[in-house]
């Protein structure tokens, strides 16, 4: 999305999608909501791992935490939907606090450190009597809303979160933070020696990615209603993010969307195979990381652009054509 | 309390076996194998399946499975890990994490979600215990595990210090390029390290299955614990993994006294605290200052003011 034309197209697409609940059936709306949540997870993980070189295995912390904060706020008397938004913001705030610690960890330490932090948060949340340990709880306040309307609001919430994050990321990557992030993604030590403020840049990106995961988490809670610590804080979210980004294309703008679409399609087609299907996802992610480092988007986009580009003759080698005198 | 301390200490032996392989692979190949815990579970299920199918003693089954695990390690190194080595730190993490997902779900698909144990196949040993003076009861199996851990670490130490392979491994770990110049075959060294690491993971998994239960999705927890033991004990140190494992085990046992959730929580918090303390020390070191602020050293502070 480099030009105003692309921006206009994106706005038109979002507005068009916003009208879907008006005429589509319940299952379509539910499925699109899931797709938007996947896209939100994929794009924000790509922002973090692809652009800032931060391979986190702990984004489920913010996915679960957004929902937990929302439940706590509703318990404290806040209406459900504002609580969901506030919950996501609260999780991002906590990410900012945590970033002072985790961003000082290096590579593998960072990957496992974020994971351990996510586990600690899960255990602490499970100790809260409101959550009742393994049993979990549900956002009963949402049951008061009429199901049809609830489904539509959940859908718009996910769509707005996705569009908002996409816009924020586009703005961010065009700013000086984006330039710094690209330098860091290539080589963080070299970037630091050139005067790029590595920690500061990573902090901005880490918090934004956490906000994305938390928004996905509250959107998930809004449509699933139940909150199970083992599910909402599950490391499987990281597996899914890894799959979508690696298969779609790490460090590309469109790759994560392709990855999310693919994951969604695979889940529709092969979700019944359960564990074998998940094993296949892991293998596909590892295989893409090894043999297709640019992902599907990286492999396909040159071909697509060749297909759709106007055939043009390069001026330097063009042969003067015979002119026919009229 | 004393009993919890002893249990934690013995648990540390198990963690040391699990962590030694992870530490070895990191030391030699500079990769953190995020599938290490899953490989341990694979080893455990291998021993369980062999015991159930053939009626062999678990110890004999273990002796048969370990060489197979070593071969698995060689194959993984040859076909998978070696391809990731040249591409920086990101790729090994991504690929081993994907491998972990494959192993977990394949085990789940093949064996179902049921938690399994070798306890019944062990007979009396599964619950046999010794009574120490003071009425403290110690299970025989945890003691055996601890003894195995010390033996394994001792054997590794001998291997690294007194054999040709060990010298090659140490050379490749400390300076790969200089080692290559001296004629060390890096591929061979890497394969040997992977074989040892995966076999140790399998041993740890089987020992876990004897004392407790294993389930297909248990690998990530084991990985985290192994990594915690490595970091607490200090990366790159063989006996450090035993110390780290013991500290982790003691923290967990004491945490469990407080609450069932406290077992994991205390281990995680110890890990994060150790990591944080190390970061703090490095930070102070970079500033050229002692690890603790001046107000802890009144005399040093006065000196600084005078200067």
Image: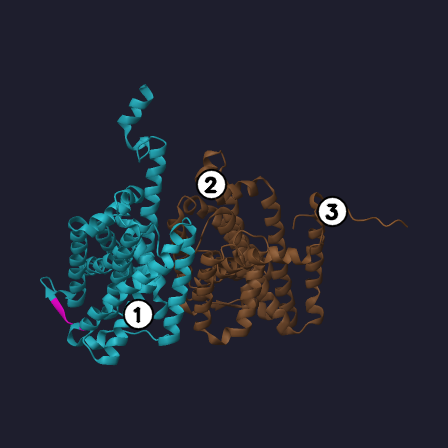
Mark 1 and mark 3 in contact? Answer it, CB < 8 Å.
Answer: no
Foreground of the two, B44 or A320: A320
* Chain letter matching colour cyan: B
Question: Residue A91: image x %, image y %?
Answer: 50, 53
Q: CA distance from mark 3 to mark 2?
A: 55 Å
Q: Marks 1 and 3: which is nearer the front?
A: 3
Q: Give the residue displayed 61% in from the left and 67% down from the top.
A: A32
Circle 3 residue: A319
Classify residue B171 by image quadrant.
top left
Circle 1 residue: B214
Classify residue B261 by image quadrant.
bottom left
Is label 1 on the same chain as label 3? no
Question: Residue A306: image x %, image y %?
Answer: 65, 56
**The residue stretch that appears in magenta:** B126-130
Q: Chain of mark 2?
A: A
Q: Marks 3 and 2: which is nearer the front?
A: 3
Label for residue A239?
none
Foreground of the two, B10 or B101: B101
Foreground of the two, A140 or A53: A53
Q: Chain of mark 1?
A: B
Within 10 Å of disc 2 (Cα), the crowding (few <14, some 14-19, many 20+) is some
The answer to whether residue A60 is visible is no
Which secondary structure lies at badge 2?
Answer: helix
């Amino acid at each position: 999305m480099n030009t105003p034309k692309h921006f206009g197209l994106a706005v038109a697409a979002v507005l068009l999608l916003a009208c879907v609940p008006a005429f589509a059936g319940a299952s379509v709306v539910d499925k699109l909501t899931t797709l938007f949540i996947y896209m939100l997870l994929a794009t924000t993980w790509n922002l973090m791992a692809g652009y800032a070189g931060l391979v986190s295995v702990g984004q489920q912390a913010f996915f679960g935490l957004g929902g937990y904060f929302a439940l706590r706020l509703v318990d404290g008397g806040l209406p459900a939907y504002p609580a969901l938004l506030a919950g996501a913001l609260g999780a991002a705030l906590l990410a900012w606090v945590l970033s002072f610690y985790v961003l000082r960890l290096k590579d593998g330490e960072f990957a496992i450190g974020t994971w351990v932090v996510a586990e600690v948060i899960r255990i602490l949340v499970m100790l809260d009597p409101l959550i009742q340990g393994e049993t979990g709880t549900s956002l009963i306040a949402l049951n008061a809303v009429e199901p049809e309307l609830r489904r539509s609001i959940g859908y718009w919430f996910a769509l707005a979160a996705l569009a908002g994050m996409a816009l924020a990321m586009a703005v961010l990557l065009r700013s000086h933070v984006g330039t710094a992030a690209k330098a860091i993604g290539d080589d963080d030590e070299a970037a630091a020696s050139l005067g790029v403020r590595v920690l500061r840049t990573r902090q901005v990106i880490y918090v934004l990615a956490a906000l994305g995961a938390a928004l996905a988490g509250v959107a998930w809670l809004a449509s699933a209603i139940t909150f199970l610590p083992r599910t909402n804080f599950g490391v499987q979210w990281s597996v899914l993010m890894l799959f979508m980004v690696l298969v779609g294309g790490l460090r590309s703008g469109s790759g994560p969307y392709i990855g999310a679409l693919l994951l969604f399609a695979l889940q529709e087609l092969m979700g019944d195979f359960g564990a074998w299907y998940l094993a296949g996802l892991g293998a596909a992610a590892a295989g893409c990381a090894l043999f297709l480092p640019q992902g599907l988007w990286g492999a396909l986009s040159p071909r697509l652009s060749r297909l759709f580009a106007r055939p043009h003759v390069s001026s330097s080698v063009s042969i003067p054509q015979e002119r026919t005198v009229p | 309390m004393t009993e919890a301390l002893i249990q934690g200490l013995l648990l540390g032996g198990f963690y040391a076996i699990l962590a030694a392989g992870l530490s070895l692979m990191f030391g030699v190949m500079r990769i953190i194998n995020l599938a290490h815990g899953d490989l341990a579970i694979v080893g455990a299920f291998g021993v369980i399946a062999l015991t159930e199918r053939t009626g062999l003693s678990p110890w004999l089954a273990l002796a048969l499975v370990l060489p197979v695990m070593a071969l698995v390690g060689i194959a993984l190194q040859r076909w998978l890990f070696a391809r990731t080595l040249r591409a920086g730190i990101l790729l090994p993490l991504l690929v081993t994490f994907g491998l972990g997902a494959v192993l977990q779900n394949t085990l789940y698909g093949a064996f179902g979600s049921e938690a399994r144990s070798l306890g019944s196949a062990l007979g009396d040993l599964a619950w046999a215990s010794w009574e120490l003076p003071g009425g403290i009861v110690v299970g025989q199996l945890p003691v055996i595990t601890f003894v195995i851990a010390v033996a394994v670490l001792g054997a590794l130490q001998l291997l690294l210090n007194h054999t040709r392979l060990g010298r090659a491994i140490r050379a490749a770990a400390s300076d790969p390029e200089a080692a290559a110049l001296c004629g060390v075959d890096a591929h061979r060294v890497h394969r040997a390290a992977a074989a040892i690491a995966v076999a140790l993971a399998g041993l740890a998994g089987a020992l876990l299955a004897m004392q407790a239960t294993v389930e297909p999705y248990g690998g990530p927890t084991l990985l985290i614990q192994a990594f915690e033991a490595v970091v607490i004990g200090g990366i790159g140190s063989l006996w450090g993994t035993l110390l780290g494992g013991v500290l982790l085990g003691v923290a967990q046992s004491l945490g469990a006294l407080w609450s069932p959730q406290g077992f994991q929580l205390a281990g995680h918090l110890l890990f994060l605290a150790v990591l944080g303390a190390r970061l703090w020390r490095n930070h102070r070191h970079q500033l050229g200052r002692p690890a603790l602020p001046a107000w802890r050293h009144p005399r040093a502070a006065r000196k600084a003011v005078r200067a």
